Image: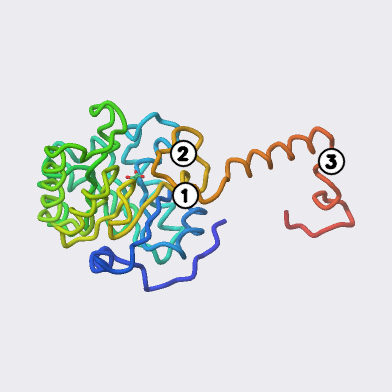
C-alpha cells in the first residue's frame, strides 16, 4: 500500500519554469517510477517521464518502443510519487507527427489520464504546427531539438548536431520555430557548446541541456545513467554520480550465498509462536 505524500499546493507549473529563463539553473531529471519520483522530488524542479523508459526499463533498442499506454502508466506513477516537481510526459513516436489534431488528441489523453503539467515532443520547424495546436488546446509543451532519439534510425545513430554551418542554421531555425509556436521550454540534446550558447541567447524560453554544455538555462540527465544503473550504452556526456550497478550486484551476490548456506533467513526474519505479532 502506497504511503500518502504530504499534500502541497506548491507544485511547480510550466509557467514558473518559463519564468526561470536566465536565472538559477533549472534542475531536471527523468523519472519513470513511484519510488524514484519520491526520492528525486525534493531535489529537482522538473521530472521528465521520458520515452527513454522504453530502453531503460523495458529493454527496447530505441525509444520507438514506447507507446502512449506505457507513457501514461509511468506518468501516473511519477505523479503519485511527486508533490512539488513540474512533471512533463514525453509524447511517444507515432502519436503526434501526422497532424495537429492527432497531436492534440494524444496530448489530451496524456494530461487527462496522468494529471501531468506538460508534454514534450521532438522536432523543430517540422513540428511547429503540432506544438502550436497543443498549446492552443491549453496544454504546455516542452520542445526537443538537436539529437532526437526518435530519429536515430533515420539519422544512422546517436550523432552530435551542429558541426556544420548548415546544421547550425537548421538548429537555430528549429529553436526559433519551437519558441514561436508557444513552447514553455526547449530541450537541446547533443550539440556543441557554442551552438547551445547561441540558441540560449536568441530565445526567451529556457533551454534545458543534455550533452549541450552549461551554457543552457538548465540541465537534464536520464536518472539511470546518472546513478550508474544503465546496463547498456551510456552517452559520453553523462556524469555518473553513483554506482548502483555494483551496489545491486554485490547485494545479489551476498543474498545468493546466504540462501545457499541457509544463513538467510536468520532468527530475526522468522516467525515463531513466541516471537512477533501478526504483522509481516
Ligand atoms: O526520453 C528522454 O529521457 C529524454 C531526455 C533525454 C531529454 O528525452
Which quadrant: the N terminus? bottom right
**Between 264 and 278, the one nearer to me in the picture:** 264
**Label disc, if present, on residue 33 of the rendered structure:** 1
**Between 30 and 108, the one nearer to me in the picture:** 30
Q: What residue is drawn where x is 16% and y is 56%?
A: 135
**Label disc, if present, on residue 263 of the rendered structure:** 3
**Label disc, if present, on residue 256 of the rendered structure:** none
Q: Is residue 173 shown left or right of residue 72? A: left
Above/below status of 231 relative to 80: above
Give the image location of residue 171, x and y in percent: 16, 44
Q: How many angstroms separate mark 2 from mark 1 (CA)?
A: 10 Å
Above/below status of 110 relative to 62: below
The quadrant of the rendered image in which ligand 1 is seen is top left
Disc 2 designates what residue? 57
Above/below status of 177 relative to 98: below
Q: How many angstroms separate mark 1 from mark 3 (CA)?
A: 32 Å
Q: Is mark 2 within 8 Å of ligand 1?
A: no
Disc 2, SS: loop
Give the image location of residue 23, x and y in percent: 28, 69
Q: First in sequence: mark 3 or mark 2?
A: 2
Determine which quarter of the picture holds residue 260.
Answer: top right
Indicate the colouring scheme: rainbow
Q: Determine crowd level at label 2: few under 14, some 14-19, many 20+ residues with C-alpha closer than 10 A.
A: few
Amino acid at each position: 500500500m502506497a504511503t500518502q505524500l504530504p499534500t502541497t499546493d506548491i507544485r511547480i507549473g510550466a509557467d514558473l519554469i518559463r519564468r526561470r529563463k536566465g536565472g538559477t539553473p533549472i534542475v531536471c531529471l527523468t523519472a519513470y517510477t513511484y519510488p524514484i519520483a519520491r526520492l528525486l522530488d525534493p531535489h529537482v524542479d522538473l521530472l521528465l517521464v521520458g520515452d527513454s523508459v522504453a530502453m531503460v526499463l523495458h529493454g527496447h533498442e530505441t525509444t520507438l518502443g514506447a507507446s502512449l499506454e506505457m507513457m501514461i502508466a509511468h506518468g501516473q506513477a511519477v505523479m503519485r510519487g511527486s508533490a512539488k516537481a513540474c512533471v512533463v510526459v514525453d509524447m511517444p513516436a507515432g502519436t503526434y507527427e501526422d497532424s495537429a489534431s492527432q497531436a492534440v488528441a494524444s496530448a489530451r489523453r496524456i494530461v487527462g489520464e496522468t494529471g501531468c503539467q506538460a508534454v514534450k515532443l521532438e522536432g523543430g520547424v517540422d513540428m511547429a504546427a503540432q506544438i502550436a495546436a497543443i498549446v492552443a488546446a491549453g496544454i504546455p509543451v516542452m520542445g526537443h531539438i538537436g539529437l532526437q532519439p526518435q530519429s536515430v534510425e533515420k539519422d544512422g545513430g546517436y550523432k552530435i548536431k551542429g558541426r556544420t554551418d548548415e546544421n547550425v542554421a537548421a538548429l537555430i531555425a528549429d529553436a526559433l520555430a519551437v519558441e514561436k509556436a508557444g513552447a514553455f521550454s526547449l530541450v537541446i540534446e547533443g550539440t556543441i557548446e557554442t551552438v547551445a550558447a547561441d540558441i540560449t541567447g536568441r530565445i526567451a524560453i529556457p533551454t534545458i541541456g543534455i550533452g549541450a554544455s552549461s551554457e543552457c538555462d538548465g540541465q537534464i540527465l536520464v536518472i539511470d545513467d546518472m546513478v550508474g544503473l544503465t546496463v547498456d550504452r551510456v552517452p559520453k556526456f553523462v556524469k555518473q554520480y553513483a554506482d548502483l550497478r555494483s551496489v545491486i550486484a554485490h547485494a545479489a551476490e551476498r543474498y545468493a550465498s546466504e540462501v545457499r548456506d541457509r544463513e538467510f533467513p536468520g532468527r530475526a526474519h522468522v516467525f515463531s509462536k513466541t516471537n512477533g505479532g501478526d504483522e509481516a
